[in-house]
């Protein structure tokens, strides 16, 4: 039997937050492996630790304890500068709230990761334009977010996640602010991204996304459910 190479490996990962005099355990001994090219969905009640788990996968936060290996890098041993480089080159993020900058055009929003990677302007614009065309927004390059529908804004966010050709795309409730039909379009777009070989991990409450995934894991009270 051929064992798929791992894109993400978590071993006994814990995350604890200090809130005043209280300690809150967001993750408790989480062990999880995601294969390269897999489409994984993480589900669970609000406050169960889903978004915390995704943040650790993307290097947005560090574990309190445990081993986090993503794309061959031991994230729990990286410093802030190394984590920033990892986030810029290896992972693409898609958020529920889109997180677009209002006074930038579509292509300028998409090009932001390239700007931080010090890609020259002409190449930034060409790559951002290509990414927007891939998500069906080649006609919206010069539009600002307030000139776009919610679905179009999320497509811009997806294009931004793709522009650096990341190995892994992490999406946190990507259809949460969208109507059913538009949400389905985003699901199909994410499927197409995964079909090209990109590892895809999605946190969602949406059963329509879970039905499309190769695997679904449940998290409850900071622990992966059996």
Image: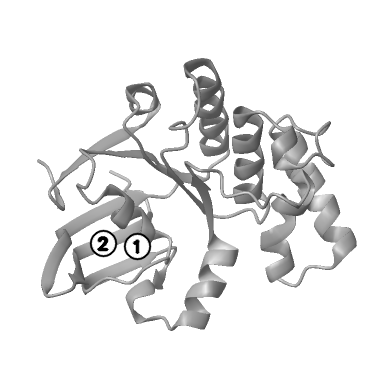
Disc 1 marks which residue?
A: 56
- Residue at the location (60% across, 42% down)? 158
Q: Pinpoint residue 205: horizontal percent, then vertical percent.
A: 31, 31
- Is disc 1 placed on a helix, strand or loop? helix
Query: Does 10 sit left or right of 94 as displayed?
Result: left
Identify which residue, 193 or 103, lies in the foreground: 103
| Colouring scheme, one of rainbow, by chain, secondary structure, one colour | one colour
Q: Distance between the residues labelled 2 and 1?
A: 9 Å
Location of the N terminus by quadrant is top left
What count of labels does the image hold? 2
Q: Does 90 sit above or below residue 136?
A: below
Local packing at callout 1 (Cα closer than 10 Å; few below 14, some 14-19, many 20+) is many
Local packing at callout 2 (Cα closer than 10 Å; few below 14, some 14-19, many 20+) is many
Q: Pinpoint residue 57: horizontal percent, then vertical percent.
A: 37, 59
Q: In which quarter of the image is residue 226?
A: top left
Q: Does 129 sit above or below residue 25?
A: above
**Extreme residue toward the top, this view:** 181
Q: Quadrant of residue 22?
A: bottom left
Evaluate if marks 2 and 1 touch, with contact meaning CB atoms under 8 Å apart: yes
| Badge number at residue 225 | none
- Is disc 2 placed on a helix, strand or loop? strand
- Residue at the location (23% across, 51% down)? 49
Identify which residue, 107 or 193, lies in the foreground: 107
Foreground tag (2 vs 1)? 1
Disc 2 marks which residue?
A: 10
Q: Pinpoint residue 18: horizontal percent, then vertical percent.
A: 19, 73
Q: Does 192 sit above or below residue 179?
A: below
**Extreme residue toward the front, this view:** 20
Closer to the N terminus: mark 2 or mark 1? 2
Query: Does 139 sit left or right of 152 as displayed?
Result: right
- Residue at the location (56% across, 22% down)? 185
């Amino acid at each position: 039997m051929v064992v798929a190479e791992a894109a993400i490996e978590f071993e006994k990962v814990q995350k604890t937050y200090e809130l005043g005099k209280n300690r809150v355990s967001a993750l408790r001994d989480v062990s999880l492996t995601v294969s390269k090219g897999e489409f994984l969905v993480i589900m669970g009640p609000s406050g169960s630790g889903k978004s915390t788990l995704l943040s650790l996968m993307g290097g947005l936060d560090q574990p309190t304890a445990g081993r986090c290996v993503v794309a061959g890098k031991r994230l729990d041993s990286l410093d802030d500068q190394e984590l920033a480089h990892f986030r810029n080159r290896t992972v693409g993020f898609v958020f529920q709230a889109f997180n677009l900058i209002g006074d930038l055009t579509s292509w300028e929003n998409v090009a932001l990761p390239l700007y931080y990677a010090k890609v020259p302007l002409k190449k930034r614009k060409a790559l951002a334009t290509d990414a927007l065309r891939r998500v069906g927004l080649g006609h919206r390059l010069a539009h600002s977010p307030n000139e776009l529908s919610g679905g179009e804004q999320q497509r811009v966010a997806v294009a931004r996640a793709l522009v650096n050709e990341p190995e892994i795309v992490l999406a946190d409730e990507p259809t949460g602010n969208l109507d059913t039909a538009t949400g389905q379009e985003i699901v199909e777009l994410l499927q197409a991204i995964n079909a090209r070989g990109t590892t895809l991990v999605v946190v969602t409450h949406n059963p329509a996304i879970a039905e499309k995934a190769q695997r679904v894991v449940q998290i409850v009270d900071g622990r992966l459910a059996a």
